[in-house]
Image (spheres, rainbow, N blue to C red):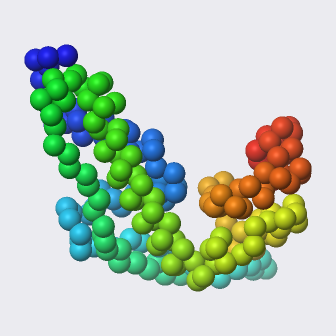
Amino acid sequence: MANEFITTQQIADAASVLLENRLVLAGTLDHNTESMFGRGTGKSVLVRTAASLTPAGDLNKDGTADTDTLNETSTEVVLEKHFYKKVALSAVDRTLGIQDLAKQVIAPMMDSIVMSIEAYANAKLAANAGGKTGSTYAAPTTLADCARANKWFTEKRIVPQGRYAFVGPDSEEALLQLEGFTSGDYGADGPQAL
Protein backbone atom coordinates (compact mmCIF):
# COMPACT_ATOMS: atom_id res chain seq x y z
CA MET A 1 0.00 0.00 0.00
CA ALA A 2 1.54 3.30 -1.06
CA ASN A 3 1.97 6.19 1.37
CA GLU A 4 1.69 4.02 4.49
CA PHE A 5 4.09 5.18 7.19
CA ILE A 6 5.87 2.21 8.78
CA THR A 7 7.91 2.80 11.92
CA THR A 8 11.12 1.03 12.84
CA GLN A 9 9.27 -0.36 15.88
CA GLN A 10 6.72 -2.05 13.59
CA ILE A 11 9.54 -3.60 11.58
CA ALA A 12 11.38 -4.72 14.72
CA ASP A 13 8.19 -6.22 16.16
CA ALA A 14 7.47 -8.15 12.97
CA ALA A 15 11.07 -9.34 12.74
CA SER A 16 11.07 -10.43 16.39
CA VAL A 17 7.91 -12.50 16.01
CA LEU A 18 9.14 -14.11 12.79
CA LEU A 19 12.54 -14.90 14.29
CA GLU A 20 11.13 -16.40 17.46
CA ASN A 21 8.67 -18.59 15.53
CA ARG A 22 11.38 -19.92 13.21
CA LEU A 23 14.03 -20.90 15.78
CA VAL A 24 14.20 -24.61 16.53
CA LEU A 25 17.38 -25.60 18.38
CA ALA A 26 18.21 -22.10 19.61
CA GLY A 27 14.57 -21.62 20.57
CA THR A 28 14.95 -24.31 23.26
CA LEU A 29 17.74 -22.45 25.02
CA ASP A 30 17.21 -20.22 28.06
CA HIS A 31 16.67 -16.60 27.00
CA ASN A 32 16.26 -15.07 30.47
CA THR A 33 19.53 -13.15 30.37
CA GLU A 34 19.47 -11.88 26.78
CA SER A 35 18.17 -8.45 27.78
CA MET A 36 21.23 -8.00 30.03
CA PHE A 37 23.61 -7.99 27.07
CA GLY A 38 24.68 -4.72 25.51
CA ARG A 39 24.98 -4.26 21.80
CA GLY A 40 27.71 -5.96 19.84
CA THR A 41 30.02 -8.86 20.43
CA GLY A 42 32.41 -9.19 23.35
CA LYS A 43 29.87 -8.06 25.97
CA SER A 44 29.43 -10.36 28.95
CA VAL A 45 27.03 -11.00 31.79
CA LEU A 46 27.21 -13.15 34.90
CA VAL A 47 24.57 -15.86 34.91
CA ARG A 48 23.71 -17.31 38.31
CA THR A 49 23.61 -21.07 38.55
CA ALA A 50 21.62 -22.98 41.15
CA ALA A 51 23.30 -24.27 44.28
CA SER A 52 24.23 -27.91 44.58
CA LEU A 53 23.05 -29.40 47.87
CA THR A 54 23.93 -32.58 49.72
CA PRO A 55 21.34 -35.37 49.74
CA ALA A 56 18.39 -34.80 52.05
CA GLY A 57 18.40 -36.57 55.39
CA ASP A 58 15.91 -37.65 58.02
CA LEU A 59 14.68 -35.32 60.71
CA ASN A 60 16.69 -35.56 63.90
CA LYS A 61 15.05 -37.34 66.88
CA ASP A 62 14.37 -33.97 68.51
CA GLY A 63 12.45 -32.78 65.41
CA THR A 64 15.22 -30.54 64.10
CA ALA A 65 16.86 -30.82 60.70
CA ASP A 66 20.42 -30.31 59.56
CA THR A 67 20.92 -27.06 57.67
CA ASP A 68 22.68 -27.02 54.33
CA THR A 69 24.38 -23.97 52.84
CA LEU A 70 23.35 -22.55 49.48
CA ASN A 71 26.54 -22.01 47.54
CA GLU A 72 25.42 -20.40 44.31
CA THR A 73 27.93 -19.74 41.59
CA SER A 74 27.98 -17.50 38.56
CA THR A 75 29.19 -18.21 35.08
CA GLU A 76 30.39 -15.47 32.76
CA VAL A 77 28.67 -15.66 29.39
CA VAL A 78 30.17 -13.68 26.52
CA LEU A 79 28.17 -12.63 23.49
CA GLU A 80 30.33 -14.11 20.74
CA LYS A 81 28.08 -13.50 17.76
CA HIS A 82 25.54 -10.86 16.83
CA PHE A 83 23.95 -12.02 13.60
CA TYR A 84 22.23 -9.51 11.35
CA LYS A 85 21.11 -9.20 7.76
CA LYS A 86 21.06 -6.00 5.74
CA VAL A 87 19.28 -5.69 2.41
CA ALA A 88 18.83 -2.90 -0.09
CA LEU A 89 15.16 -2.08 -0.59
CA SER A 90 13.95 -1.43 -4.10
CA ALA A 91 11.53 1.35 -4.92
CA VAL A 92 8.74 -1.24 -5.05
CA ASP A 93 9.76 -2.69 -1.64
CA ARG A 94 9.48 0.78 -0.12
CA THR A 95 5.81 0.98 -1.14
CA LEU A 96 4.79 -2.20 0.69
CA GLY A 97 2.52 -2.17 3.73
CA ILE A 98 3.74 -3.89 6.91
CA GLN A 99 2.09 -7.26 6.12
CA ASP A 100 3.56 -7.44 2.63
CA LEU A 101 6.91 -6.09 3.83
CA ALA A 102 6.99 -8.81 6.48
CA LYS A 103 6.23 -11.49 3.88
CA GLN A 104 8.42 -10.23 1.03
CA VAL A 105 11.41 -8.76 2.90
CA ILE A 106 11.51 -9.38 6.65
CA ALA A 107 10.71 -13.14 6.56
CA PRO A 108 13.54 -13.98 4.12
CA MET A 109 15.90 -11.87 6.24
CA MET A 110 14.85 -13.72 9.40
CA ASP A 111 15.25 -17.08 7.64
CA SER A 112 18.83 -16.10 6.82
CA ILE A 113 19.51 -15.13 10.42
CA VAL A 114 17.84 -18.29 11.74
CA MET A 115 20.07 -20.48 9.56
CA SER A 116 23.15 -18.78 11.02
CA ILE A 117 21.89 -18.93 14.61
CA GLU A 118 20.89 -22.59 14.35
CA ALA A 119 24.24 -23.59 12.81
CA TYR A 120 26.13 -21.65 15.49
CA ALA A 121 24.03 -23.10 18.35
CA ASN A 122 24.47 -26.61 16.98
CA ALA A 123 28.25 -26.17 16.72
CA LYS A 124 28.49 -24.76 20.27
CA LEU A 125 26.35 -27.52 21.75
CA ALA A 126 28.32 -30.20 19.91
CA ALA A 127 31.63 -28.69 21.07
CA ASN A 128 30.44 -28.66 24.68
CA ALA A 129 28.99 -32.17 24.60
CA GLY A 130 32.38 -33.76 25.15
CA GLY A 131 32.29 -35.41 21.75
CA LYS A 132 28.89 -36.99 22.46
CA THR A 133 27.11 -35.82 19.35
CA GLY A 134 24.95 -37.71 16.90
CA SER A 135 27.86 -37.93 14.50
CA THR A 136 29.84 -40.10 16.95
CA TYR A 137 27.16 -42.73 17.45
CA ALA A 138 25.43 -45.12 15.13
CA ALA A 139 21.81 -44.35 14.36
CA PRO A 140 19.38 -46.15 16.71
CA THR A 141 18.33 -49.54 15.41
CA THR A 142 16.06 -50.74 18.22
CA LEU A 143 13.67 -49.27 20.73
CA ALA A 144 16.24 -50.33 23.34
CA ASP A 145 18.59 -47.67 21.91
CA CYS A 146 15.95 -45.04 22.64
CA ALA A 147 15.37 -46.48 26.11
CA ARG A 148 19.12 -46.30 26.86
CA ALA A 149 19.16 -42.63 25.87
CA ASN A 150 16.13 -42.00 28.10
CA LYS A 151 17.85 -43.83 30.98
CA TRP A 152 20.94 -41.65 30.58
CA PHE A 153 18.81 -38.49 30.89
CA THR A 154 17.07 -39.88 33.96
CA GLU A 155 20.36 -40.81 35.62
CA LYS A 156 21.58 -37.26 35.03
CA ARG A 157 18.37 -36.04 36.75
CA ILE A 158 17.17 -34.23 33.64
CA VAL A 159 13.42 -34.09 34.09
CA PRO A 160 11.22 -35.23 31.19
CA GLN A 161 9.61 -31.78 30.82
CA GLY A 162 12.01 -29.72 28.76
CA ARG A 163 14.04 -32.63 27.39
CA TYR A 164 14.91 -32.25 23.75
CA ALA A 165 16.64 -34.58 21.35
CA PHE A 166 18.01 -33.20 18.14
CA VAL A 167 18.87 -35.79 15.57
CA GLY A 168 20.23 -35.61 12.09
CA PRO A 169 18.44 -36.95 9.03
CA ASP A 170 20.10 -40.40 9.26
CA SER A 171 19.02 -40.89 12.88
CA GLU A 172 15.54 -39.57 12.10
CA GLU A 173 15.20 -42.06 9.25
CA ALA A 174 16.32 -44.90 11.52
CA LEU A 175 13.88 -43.84 14.27
CA LEU A 176 10.97 -43.65 11.86
CA GLN A 177 11.64 -47.25 10.78
CA LEU A 178 11.19 -48.52 14.36
CA GLU A 179 7.63 -49.77 14.67
CA GLY A 180 7.52 -49.12 18.41
CA PHE A 181 8.74 -45.58 18.00
CA THR A 182 6.18 -44.55 15.40
CA SER A 183 3.28 -46.39 17.08
CA GLY A 184 3.97 -44.34 20.24
CA ASP A 185 2.58 -41.34 18.39
CA TYR A 186 -0.86 -42.95 18.29
CA GLY A 187 -1.22 -44.38 21.78
CA ALA A 188 -3.08 -42.89 24.73
CA ASP A 189 0.00 -40.91 25.69
CA GLY A 190 0.57 -39.62 22.15
CA PRO A 191 4.16 -38.54 21.49
CA GLN A 192 4.82 -38.73 25.25
CA ALA A 193 4.64 -42.53 25.03
CA LEU A 194 8.40 -42.68 24.77
106 relative position to 123: left or right = left
| Residue 85 vs residue 47, the one in the foreground | 85
Q: Which residue is drawn at 75% across and 73% down?
A: 138
User: In the rendered image, which quarter contains the N terminus?
Assistant: top left
- The location of residue 150, given as percent across then percent down, is 77, 65
| Residue 92 vs residue 54, the one in the foreground | 92
- The location of residue 127, given as percent across then percent down, is 51, 78
Q: Report if residue 99 is visible in the image.
A: yes
- The location of residue 43, given as percent across then percent down, is 24, 71
Q: Report if residue 68 is visible in the image.
A: no
56 relative position to 194: left or right = left
| Residue 88 vs residue 152, the one in the foreground | 88
Residue 100 picture quarter: top left
Residue 139 picture quarter: bottom right
Q: Which residue is drawn at 21% across and 24% down?
A: 96
| Residue 10 vs residue 86, the one in the foreground | 86
Q: Which residue is drawn at 46% across and 49% down?
A: 23
Report how many numbered discs are placed on residues in the image.
0
29 relative position to 151: left or right = left
Q: Which residue is drawn at 71% across and 56% down?
A: 172
Figure check: 53 above or below 115: below
Residue 164 picture quarter: bottom right
- The location of residue 52, given as percent across then percent down, is 57, 79
